[in-house]
Image: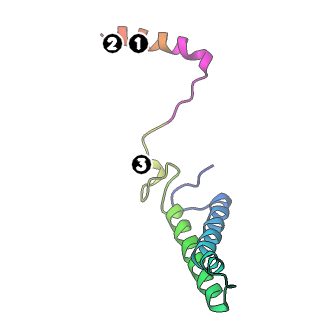
Amino acid sequence: MKSIFLSLNLNDLMKGCIVAIFAAVGMAIIPSLEAGTLPTLVMLQSAGVTGLAAGLAYLLKNFLSNSANKPFVSEKDVTTREITVPVAAVPAVQATIQKVSDATK
């Protein structure tokens, strides 16, 4: 389930950690290994700060978005709804829509 506006859930925190790890690995560790050297303490520290910043940015984005992934919009302001109809019910739904359409003409 997606978190609502101005809240985070465990799923958001786990994804934030994954973003932080990938950012840290991509920023400092991979380039140093491609150069044929091991990362130094300064490189690892830089990677950690980069990963932390990326993870916090992801969490802030999720904190300020609602469950429909719209930033700065509360849940009560969301007007769209998704309706799932089973495939077997499609002909009946189409017939009902047609009857309502004919009745409103």
| Residue 26: image location, x then y, percent | 59, 72
**Residue type of the residue flagged with mark 2:** Thr
Placement of the C terminus among the 4 image quadrants = top left
Q: Judge whether 73 appears above or below 23 on screen.
A: above
Tag 1 or tag 3, which sits nearer the N-term?
Answer: 3
Q: Judge whether 11 appears above or below 103 on screen.
A: below
How far apart, in angstroms, are the residues tagged by discs 2 and 3? 29 Å
Closer to us: 50 or 33: 33
Mark 2 neighbour class, 10 Å CA radius: few under 14, some 14 to 19, many 20 or more: few
Q: Which residues are magenta?
A: 82-93
Q: Which residue is mark 3?
A: 77
Label ID, residue 100: 1
Mark 3 neighbour class, 10 Å CA radius: few under 14, some 14 to 19, many 20 or more: few
| Residue 63: image location, x then y, percent | 53, 63
**Residue type of the residue flagged with mark 3:** Asp
Question: Hey, which quadrant is residue 35 in on the image?
Answer: bottom right
Pointer 3 with pointer 1, Cβ within 8 A: no
Question: The residue tagged with tag 1: helix, strand or loop?
Answer: helix
Mark 1 neighbour class, 10 Å CA radius: few under 14, some 14 to 19, many 20 or more: few
Residue at the spot x=45%, y=48% of the render? 76
| Residue 74: image location, x then y, percent | 45, 54
Question: Hey, which quadrant is residue 71 in on the image?
Answer: bottom left
How far apart, in angstroms, are the residues tagged by discs 3 and 1? 28 Å
